């Protein structure tokens, strides 16, 4: 993930004026180009999306789950628009014509080989500041899942491998079996 033009500041209006075939994110006025994803990345995103969507539907839940590309404006008055790999939004008032205005309840990012620091540092801090309740970083290269819960009671993340079942913090009874999921890839 590369900054489009170093030193140049972009607004949300300029972001939304970009051609539709250009995938990018805007963080604090800096435009980041998003490269095409590898098959394993897309497979993991698809499997997670379907498992979460099916859980919500089967429970008759009100939350909505969206895979990327899906624009999330974390802050109303800042030039930041991100496209998490998966966003779960439980407050329908946050849903707009363009995507989501405000913090999703749960965000999942699947690491791309090009720049893992973007998800582990920049986005982690951004999501925490915005008030995202739960943030998962799924790292296919290391076959790991790091779960951050945004709570004063829980400062340290939980670490899992692709051999584990990972419990979702925003739901009492949703766990994702990574061994079962990986078999589908």
Image (cartoon, grey):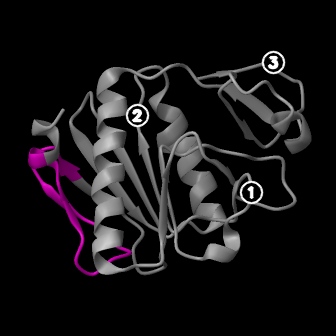
The residues bearing labels 1 and 3 have C-alpha atoms spaced at a distance of 28 Å
What residue sits 47% from the left and 78% below the top? 62
Query: Which residue carries the number 1 mark?
Result: 97
Decide whether residue 82 is among the magenta residues. Answer: no
Density class for disc 3 (Cα within 10 Å; few <14, some 14-19, many ≥20) is: few
In the picture, measured across the screen, residue 52 lies left or right of residue 71, that is left
Task: Please say if 102 is above or below 117.
Answer: below
Residue at the disc numbered 2: 111
Query: Quick one: label 2 or label 3, which is nearer the N terminus?
Result: 3
Q: Give the quadrant of the C terminus.
A: top left
Disc 2 to disc 3, how far (Cα)? 23 Å
Write the start and end of the magenta stretch as one range.
160-180
Q: Earlier in the sequence, mark 1 or mark 3?
A: 3
Residue at left offset 82%, top offset 62%: 76
Drawn side of residue 9 relative to residue 37, left or right? right
Measuring from the top left, give residue 95's x and y in whole percent.
Answer: 67, 65
- The circle drawn on residue 5 is 3
Residue 157 at least partly seen: no
- Viewer-nearest of discs 1 and 3: 1
Badge 2: residue crowd in 10 Å (few <14, some 14–19, many ≥20):
many
Q: Position of residue 170 (x, y in %)?
A: 38, 75
């Amino acid at each position: 993930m590369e900054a489009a033009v170093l030193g140049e500041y972009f607004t949300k209006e300029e972001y939304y004026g970009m051609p539709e075939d250009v995938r990018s994110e805007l963080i604090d006025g800096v435009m980041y180009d998003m490269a095409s994803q590898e098959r394993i990345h897309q497979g993991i995103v698809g499997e997670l999306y379907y498992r979460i969507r099916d859980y919500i539907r089967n429970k008759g839940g009100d939350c909505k789950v969206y895979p990327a590309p899906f624009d999330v404006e974390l802050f109303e008055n800042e030039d930041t628009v991100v496209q998490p790999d998966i966003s779960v939004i439980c407050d329908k008032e946050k849903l707009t014509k363009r995507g989501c205005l405000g913090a999703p309840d749960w965000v999942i990012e699947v690491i791309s080989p090009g720049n893992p620091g973007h998800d582990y540092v920049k986005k982690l801090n951004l999501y925490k500041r915005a008030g995202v309740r739960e943030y998962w970083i799924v790292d296919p290269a290391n076959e790991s899942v790091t779960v951050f819960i945004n709570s004063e009671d829980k400062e340290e993340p939980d670490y899992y491998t692709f051999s584990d079942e990972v419990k979702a913090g925003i739901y009492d009874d949703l766990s994702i079996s990574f061994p079962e999921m990986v078999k589908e890839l």
